Image (tube, grey):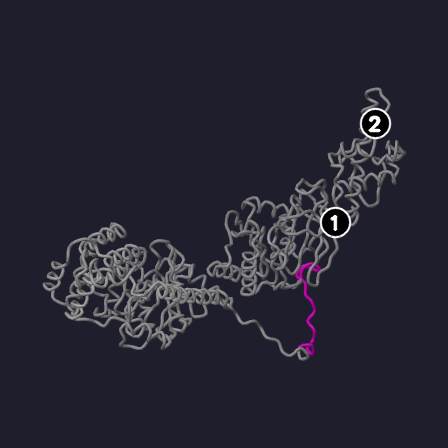
Amino acid sequence: MTDTTASKSINDQKINRNKGFGAFAAVYFSAGWRSPIPLPPGQKYPPPTRWTGKAAPYPDLAQLKKWRRESPDGNLGLRLHDGVVAVDVDTTHDGKVGAATLSAFEVEVGCEFPATWTSTSRSDGSEQRFYRVPEGLVWPSKLPGNDVELIHPGHRYSVVFPSTHPDTGDQYRWRDPEGNVSLTPPSPVDLSELPTPLVEALTANAAQPTQLASQEAATDLLSALPGGAMSVAVAAILGNAVRDLSGSRHENTRSSVDALLRLGEQGETGVQKALDILRAAFVAAIDDGERNPGTEFDRLVRSGARLVAGDPTPKVQLEGLRIASESLSPGGYWHDLIEGGSFLDDEEADAAAIEQQRITARRQMKARQLAKHDLAVEGWEAPPQSEEILVELAKDPTPVRYAVEDLAPVGSNVLLVAEAKAGKTTLVMNLVVAMVTGAKFLGKYEIGNLPVGSSITYSNFELEKSMSENWIRDMGLEDAPELHHRLYLDPWKGYKVPLPADHVEDHIVNLLLSRQSSVWVVDPYGAAINHDENSNDDTRAWTNAIDRIARRAGLSLVVLAAHSGSSSANGGDIRARGAYRLEDWMSVKWSYTHGGTVNESPPDNLRYLTARGRDVSVPVFTLDYDAPTRKLLTTVEKGSKAENEMERWALDVYKVVRDHEVAAKERGEAPGPFKAGDFNEALGISTTDSKPGGKGRLLKAGRVECVGRGWLNEQPGPGNSKLYSVGPVDPHTEGYAWTSVSASEFKVNGTE
């Protein structure tokens, strides 16, 4: 989809969303659809009287013009003409199993339904698939099984764009065979042709039209229905009929009424009782105050009676049914021959049952395989193909281009992993402001190679709108002398990006294209998703969708900010919280930390950043945070993270011994010996904490540093112990080239 097309789709969708039958009836008619019909706004029913059904006339332009005046905002229905059918698949919602029914039918026939134009208002896979078929055939109303119907000239009509669904309020939309949304309906000639094996399988057992009997004959049939308790066959039809009221109620109930009347005509008992029960259930299921379901059901019974009376069961067959019924009843000849209702012995019955289960299991497995295959290829795009490698190498080499100098190549996915309390969002805002103003990121790294005139879209899922705007304002964006790119700051706190989902991907792609965005920043990952962050499968599906969005929108850079799930290690590299797949997805990883204890507030304004990945290898470096302007700048004067961490621990160690001696003098006592173990107790550190990077080892290193600088004296004590006292050098007055942080900032008691 081109940028122009995408923008047009957005504009059309805004313009057309509130227009209905009046705006599109002529569009459908001109495209070759012979019978667009008006429906009430936001409803599927009722259609105009005498304009539906196989024998109904088709409207002309004058009739369409009249309907357009009368129903300008109505929903739009398509009554199909001969040569077109629609396969209506309901799946997932309300427990529907249409996808499985369709797959089972494909397995049975040995042929799949091809991709074609579809119409839907849902995103769960439910859809109507439209096909061209030979004219003059008789079609069934449904597939064997549940939740798949066939819409054809003699059965139903289709509700299509720009209609809205009465239950969800969502708008119907057309999709072409590739799955792209289209706001222009197809022509019937654009539809895919239904393969011959499917046509033959569907029409082989379709009921041929019968001569309807007179109403008098229908009344006689109804009057002659046998009374008594419901037979097993009648009860089974009734149970299925009540269950199927959750689907296409009118068609399912019509089929069930016809079946019950046929059983009654053949002598089965309890049909009238079953009809009474079904009528009550039908009324309860669709009594919405606008329809008269009781009258509708009675009409189904009368028409069904005329159908059955017009095509009576042959007398020979009726006689056979009577003989079979009597012989299978208790005391009958066949009843005595069969045990458990079977002519087969136990071994034969078991073998037959096992064979039937095997066939059923095979169909189910094949259906699952087909469904898995469908999901795997859904939305698949052919990747680009290269020439033979020597041909490629003979071309001029393409140098690596950086969107952020040394830190982020063009086309990369940057995963920013931030330690708790480090200020992840502040770092992100420093990045987007640098991109917009053209300033160096962190005062050091050039921004470049972003398309001229493009914008930055920053989707923040954590801050309120006013807070995020105030933070950007503090950074001086309004006072910048020149803006190189536009910035869109989306305050999406409380919203989610549920991927993969076609309509969500389409929405984001259209949004990015309409803004001409070259960079999309998502902050943070954990608040943007609605899946389990620890699931590798869910995370893989989500990140794959992000890659598709980036490709379709032509992005130069994607930045995904995430919280860390572990403490700083390995030179400042920290792991993102959740599934490992998130780190597999990235091209470049930025690790952002402070110098204090994990999950505690930073001890100072210093932050530390390192970057690694494809064509990126930047060791950890120090940043200085200026709170009033919220700006982060690279500094070499305030030491590395390791140096600053060592000095903080050395100052803490010094403070403990100094406080010990000051307290003793204030009591008028000579300071007692201060042993190595006393440091652990004073600083709340376990004596068994000896893990790499742990507080135990940092304490020991800080103690060695204090002695080496003369801040503390170390003397042998009893046994192998060491005793400590304040040394000749006061760290409060000593200056250091690699740190400008004063001792008072680290809460070290200085002299008054």
Q: Nearer the viewer, residue 353 or 658?
A: 353
The residue sitting at 16% across, 67% down in the picture is 318
Q: x%, y% of residue 671?
A: 85, 25
Front-most of residues 590 and 296: 296
In the image as oriented, which residue stretches furthest toward the top? 668
Q: Which residue is mark 2?
A: 661
From the viewer's perspective, is 331 left or right of 367?
left
Q: Nearer the viewer, residue 233 or 630?
A: 233
- Looking at the rendered structure, the secondary structure element under dot 1 is strand
Q: Position of residue 56 (x, y in %)?
A: 21, 68
Q: Which residues lie in the magenta part?
A: 392-408
Element class at badge 2: helix
Q: Mark 2 belongs to which amino acid?
A: Glu
Mark 2 Cα-neighbour bin, 10 Å: few <14, some 14–19, many ≥20: some
Q: Is residue 108 above or below residue 341?
A: below
Up-down: is 358 above or below 243? Answer: below
Quadrant in the picture for residue 405: bottom right
Residue 16's x, y, as percent?
A: 38, 61
Q: Quadrant of residue 420?
A: top right
Is 244 on the left-hand or right-hand side of 524? left
Mark 1: amino acid = Thr
Give how far apart the Cα atoms at labels 1 and 2 are. 35 Å
Residue marked by disc 1: 622
- Residue 401 sits inside the magenta stretch: yes
